[in-house]
């Protein structure tokens, strides 16, 4: 499945990487409840896969703040790029380096577990 995202990233000029990151955030880890699932209807049975207890408020706040920081950084990068600050940067070298760094980061996190 990851091969599809790699090919999609190459074909779409980076959009596949954004989709992969979004799915990485939204997909549950094995044994964990589904994020953003609807809670049980009033008087009904719980929705399958929905958590029976509410999420940890600190975890929810960390998730919201990290998404907020991510959006601020992306917005700042687009603003700086529109001002012409990246004219000297060759993005044909940057994208492969970013992908390699993300791969190394993911593997390093997996090894630590």
Image: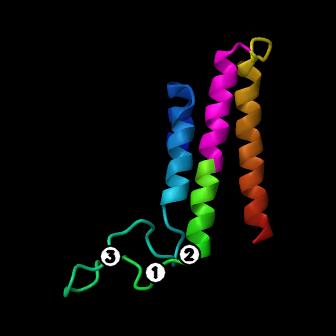
What residue would you read off at disc 2? 57
Q: Which residues are magenta?
A: 69-84
The alpha-carbon separation of the residues under discs 3 and 1 comes to: 9 Å
Q: Mark 1 and mark 3 in contact (Cβ < 8 Å)? A: no
Quadrant of the rendered image containing residue 73:
top right
Residue shown at the point (37%, 76%) measured from the top left = 50
Residue shown at the point (78%, 17%) measured from the top left = 89
Q: Badge 1, how many Cα within 10 Å: few under 14, some, many 20+? A: few
Q: Mark 2 and mark 1 in contact (Cβ < 8 Å)? A: yes
Q: Is residue 97 above or below residue 60?
A: above
| First along the sequence among labels 3 and 2 | 3
The alpha-carbon separation of the residues under discs 3 and 2 comes to: 16 Å
Q: Badge 2, how many Cα within 10 Å: few under 14, some, many 20+? A: few
What residue would you read off at disc 3? 39
Q: Main secondary structure of the magenta part?
A: helix
Q: Secondary structure at mark 1?
A: loop
What residue would you read off at disc 1? 54
State the mark number for residue 35: none
């Amino acid at each position: 499945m990851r091969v599809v995202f790699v090919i999609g990233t190459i074909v779409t000029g980076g959009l596949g990487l954004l989709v992969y990151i979004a799915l990485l955030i939204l997909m549950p880890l094995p044994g964990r409840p589904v994020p953003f699932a609807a809670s049980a209807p009033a008087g009904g049975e719980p929705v399958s896969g929905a958590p029976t207890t509410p999420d940890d408020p600190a975890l929810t706040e960390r998730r919201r703040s990290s998404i907020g920081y991510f959006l601020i950084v992306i917005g700042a990068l687009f603003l700086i790029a529109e001002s012409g600050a990246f004219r000297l940067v060759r993005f044909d070298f940057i994208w492969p380096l970013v992908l390699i760094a993300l791969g190394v980061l993911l593997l390093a996190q997996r090894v630590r577990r």
